[in-house]
């Protein structure tokens, strides 16, 4: 009996096993990347550097370019009863055609709640489609930003902004969420920073065992 390799992976420590994810090679599929995010990127080191992980990421990239990608992913979401999915724990929306496939998958999978962080808002040909993605009822779109990219000039009505903070005194502007660079997670931070910080990265959140599935902020509000 032939074994069919799945496109999705079930959970991790941050997401919880309730959330599935589809990933791509970091850097290669990140046309909106900044030098700052590349220098801090968790998906280019640690376990992501293992040969077997790199092989899977590259395999997923090749699958995403196939004409039947959307059909296969829609089928897998349905067969596995996936209720929660994050696009790209590694990688990003790398071209308009792929963004269209994502849109197709989500429209045809109303039983699944999706969310995604992307710096591809910096690519004009992709940003146009991001506006459409943000309108899908079961999708929560986050525009990722940092001190190098600055705050996006335009944020689609239903999208929000997630800021990667790399210094304590950094102005996070009107961002809705802050992801803390690893060295900052060990420091005592101002209240205005902690109020926006992802709870999976704060001492209090870790103490409570907070995960993306239990927090719900990124994929429901």
Image (tube, rainbow, N blue to C red):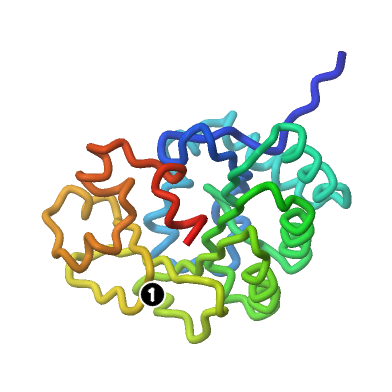
| Screen quadrant of the N terminus | top right
With respect to residue 32, does 45 lie above or below?
Answer: above
Number of numbered discs overlaid on the protein picture: 1
Residue 7: quarter of image: top right
27 to the left or right of 173:
right
Identify the residue shown where x is 59% and y is 39%: 20
User: Around disc 1, counting alpha carbons within 10 Å, would you say few (fewer than 14), some (14 to 19), or many (20 or more)?
Assistant: few
Identify the residue shown where x is 88% and y is 52%: 67
Identify the residue shown where x is 66% and y is 48%: 112
| Residue 13 place in picture, x, y as percent | 42, 34
Please tell me whether mark 1 sits on a helix, a strand or a loop.
loop
With respect to residue 88, does 195 lie above or below?
Answer: below
Residue 19: quarter of image: top right
32 to the left or right of 209:
right
Identify the residue shown where x is 31% and y is 50%: 199
Residue wearing tag 1: 148
| Residue 55 place in picture, x, y as percent | 64, 34
Q: Which is more toward the observer, 5 or 10? A: 10
| Residue 209 place in picture, x, y as percent | 31, 36
| Residue 45 place in picture, x, y as percent | 43, 42
Q: Residue furthest bottom?
A: 153
Q: Residue furthest top?
A: 1
Q: Which is more toward the observer, 107 or 63? A: 107
């Amino acid at each position: 009996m032939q074994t069919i390799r799945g496109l999705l992976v079930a959970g991790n420590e941050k997401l919880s096993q309730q959330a599935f994810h589809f990933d791509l090679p970091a850097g290669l599929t990140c046309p909106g990347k900044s030098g700052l995010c590349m220098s801090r990127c968790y998906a280019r080191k640690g376990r992501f550097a293992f040969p077997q992980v790199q092989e899977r990421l590259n395999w997923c990239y090749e699958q995403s370019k196939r004409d039947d990608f959307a059909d296969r992913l829609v089928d897998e979401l349905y067969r596995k009863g996936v209720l929660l999915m994050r696009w790209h724990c590694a990688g990003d929306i790398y071209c308009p055609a792929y963004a269209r496939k994502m849109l197709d998958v989500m429209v045809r999978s109303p039983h699944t709640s999706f969310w995604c962080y992307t710096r591809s808002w910096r690519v004009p040909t992709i940003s146009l489609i991001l506006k459409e993605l943000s309108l899908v009822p079961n999708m929560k779109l986050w525009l990722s930003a940092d001190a190098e990219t600055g705050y996006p000039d335009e944020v689609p009505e239903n999208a929000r902004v997630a800021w990667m903070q790399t210094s304590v005194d950094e102005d996070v502007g009107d961002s809705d969420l802050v992801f803390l660079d690893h060295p900052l997670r060990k420091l005592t931070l101002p209240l205005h920073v902690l109020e926006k910080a992802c709870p999976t990265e704060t001492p209090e959140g870790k103490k409570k065992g907070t995960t993306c599935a239990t927090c719900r902020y990124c994929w429901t509000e």
